[in-house]
Amino acid sequence: MSNLIRPHGSDELMALLLEGDALTAEQARAAEMPQVSITSRETGDLIMLGIGGFTPLTGFMGKADWQGVCADMKLANGIFWPIPITMSVDQETADSLNDGDEIALIAENGDLMATMKVEEKYTIDRDFECENVFKTTDDAHPGVKMVMDQKAVNLAGPVKVLSEGVFPTEFDGIYQRPTESRAFFADSGWKTIAALQLRNPMHRSHEYLGKIALETLDGLYIHQLIGGLKAGDIPADVRVNCIDALVENYFKPGTVLQGGYPLDMRYAGPREGLLHGVFRQNFGCTHMIIGRDHAGVGDYYGPFDAQEIWNEIPENAMEIQMMPIDWTFWCYKCGGMISMRTCPHEQQDRLFVSGTALRKALSEGEEVPSEFSRPEILSILREYYAGLSDDDNVEVKMHSKATGDEK
């Protein structure tokens, strides 16, 4: 694997997941520790710490790291990091713990996920975090709401991760560790790899982005979110089937790997795009595709803010490179997918392909233009939507009006 890009901020992946005898011993020790419940977002972050996806972090951030990341996108040691990775507890729990105490971290479903040595307790300025990370304090923004709903006190310290939760079983064949994607890239002889971020089934714009990358790079890593879903999101197994059908029928064999990662969306737009770059470097990618409205929600961010922020960070902040791609659409005069950068035609000649519009049309039983997505994909999605209850479809429609995503 020597020809692959280095992990972020480190010469080696820093995987905190215990295995074998070390795991058994720590599970026994955890049984004697105070138990602390963690949220879905914190669980996903913890698993990423475990598998090395958040290299070089060794646990949840202390106050100096939190403040530096919010204000300047730097850890206290100067390493670039764009979004706080923190864990919070209520005041009563915080008061019951002392620095140096060890605690067991328990997921919402009751699973023992990790142990943690408490090195610091601190409160945060929520408005300060939200203004810097999300560029808004509007609690209608789902990421802001997540921060505002956090408990009173953050706990910081190193973790020993004991479980990957439900992901290895519920997402068998799609969930991957960085060691696995890196091994695949090395075995395939890929040296240059583009990551395509997804939380929707691939429509024509996604397909076009991937094929643009493959014109100049060795491989494409279609890396989709399989963490916590919002109302109206299409389940991961349906998305996987759609991507499989697309890759099998419309991509050259041996050029694409599909994988899944266990995070919840933060909807942090530009900052989240940078986080996507950081952990895709850990997974072995050399390029991060950043298109329109990357990781955005509603109208909180401009369509290319995620590209602009990438150009504003120091050149040596990350080794992975951005692959910026302009607004893409179907042009009837060009006769195919094209971008603003190359299409000379007028607005009325263009059909803009949107995941939100696609979900809305399918949930309402409307005809979907063939230019939106391949017939194999539409067949899978129609079958999924036909099986939803009326209440489920109402949720999809409401969600489509309220949020945006990778369009």
Image (cartoon, grey):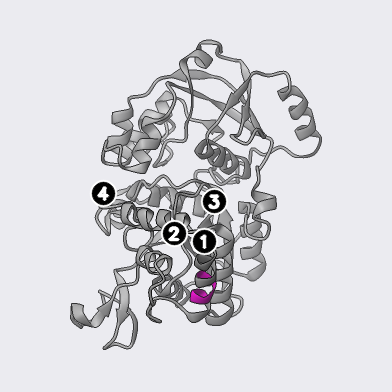
Label 4 crowd (10 A; few <14 / some 14-19 / many >=20): some
> Could you tell me what secondary structure mostly forms the magenta stretch?
helix
* Dot 3: element: helix
Give the mark nearer the N terminus: 2 vs 3.
3
Give the mark nearer the N terminus: 1 vs 4.
4
* Dot 4: element: loop
Q: x and y percent of residue 331 in the render?
A: 29, 82
Q: Amino acid at mark 1?
A: Leu
* Position of residue 292 in the picture relative to residue 17 (left or right): left
Residue shown at the point (33%, 50%) measured from the top left: 270
The vertical placement of 136 against 227, above or below, is: above
Query: Which residue position holds label 2?
Result: 393
Label 1 crowd (10 A; few <14 / some 14-19 / many >=20): few
Query: Which residue position holds label 1?
Result: 388
Label 3 crowd (10 A; few <14 / some 14-19 / many >=20): many
Question: Disc 2, disc 1: CB below 8 Å?
Answer: yes
Query: Which residue position holds label 4?
Result: 300
Residue shown at the point (38%, 60%) measured from the top left: 406
2 or 3: mark nearer the eye: 2
Tell me where the magenta segment starts and ends, as one range: 377-381
Q: x and y percent of residue 162 in the render?
A: 69, 35
Query: Which residue position holds label 3?
Result: 282
The span from disc 2 to disc 1 (Cα, nearest Å) is 6 Å
The span from disc 1 to disc 4 (Cα, nearest Å) is 30 Å
